[in-house]
Image (cartoon, coloured by chain):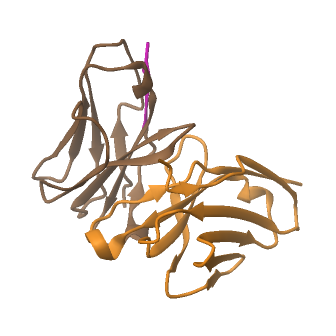
Amino acid sequence: DQQVKQNSPSLSVQEGRISILNCDYTNSMFDYFLWYKKYPAEGPTFLISISSIKDKNEDGRFTVFLNKSAKHLSLHIVPSQPGDSAVYFCAASVEKLTGANNLFFGTGTRLTVIP
Amino acid sequence: KAGVTQTPRYLIKTRGQQVTLSCSPISGHRSVSWYQQTPGQGLQFLFEYFSETQRNKGNFPGRFSGRQFSNSRSEMNVSTLELGDSALYLCASGNTGRVETQYFGPGTRLLVL
């Protein structure tokens, strides 16, 4: 059973506009959420994270929003750039419960930024 | 600083065979985690090793096993391969216990015929 879901397999956005990638989760035990970016032939790279005690975290052009009541998080990229074209994975962790580095990933959203 | 390396990068096997994949973590990192990536399931956690001990295990059958050596290099073995084992296998190394400080390798693409 997929505990982290990304229902949009792909998204296309014009350069300079906002990209919004969405993620839903089912396990209320998740207490840490992350976004990863993956280029072809490379492993995922960490982008931004948010703890369950916060509802927003910002890092440059990237902002992650967490809505715990809806079990939903989103990644906003403003402004979008062609170099942002990649597959984005949402991930969640039960870090405090297990103390171990295991992550539950979504299926990914392929973002294409059109110049 | 060299990144995480995985060998081989590509592999073709037939059903019923076994396969061993290797992961060399970043120097100084003691934790290695393995993930399976398939189009329909995304990345799924297989197991994590820390200082040669399996610290956590995902929900995969016993055909999937791993180990870690004293130099932190890790191997993953899949026995009696099935068509559904075709996937990208990623390993990630870390040291601080914070998930965001895991660094992923490029993966091994396994095709089972």
Q: Nearer the viewer, residue B69 or A25?
A: A25
Percent from the top left, x then y, of residue B110? 42, 27
- Where, quadrant-wise, is the N terminus of chain B in this rendering? bottom left
Q: In this image, B59 relative to A55: left or right?
A: left
Residue closer to the observer: A1 or A76: A1
Compared to B2, does A100 lie above or below? below
Residue B96 is at least partly visible in this image:
no
**Residue visible at 63% across and 78% down in the picture:** A67
Expressed as whole percent of the image width and height from the top left, the position of residue A43 reads 49, 49
Q: Which residues are magenta?
A: B108-113
Point out residue B78 in the picture as x, y percentages from the top left corner. Answer: 26, 29
In the rendered view, would you say A74 is above or below A50?
Answer: above
**Residue at x-position 68% and y-position 80%:** A60
Q: Is residue A92 highlighted in magenta?
A: no
- Tell me which chain appears orange: A
Residue at 64% over, 54% down: A6
Name the image quarter holding residue B80: top left
* Residue A60 in view in this figure: yes
Q: Quadrant of the C terminus of chain B?
A: top left
Residue B81, position as x, y percentages in the image: 32, 20
Q: Residue at x 73, y 71 (%)?
A: A76
Numbered label tally: 0
Q: Is residue B109 magenta?
A: yes
- What is the drawing colour of chain B? brown
Considering the whole magenta stretch, tell me its main secondary structure.
strand
Instruction: Describe residue A76's horizontal placement relative to residue B82 as left or right.
Output: right
State whether residue A66 is above or below residue B43. Answer: below
Q: Quadrant of residue A21?
A: bottom right
Q: Quadrant of residue B76?
A: top left
- Does residue A90 lie above or below A70 as drawn? above
Between A26 and B28, the one lying in front of the other is A26
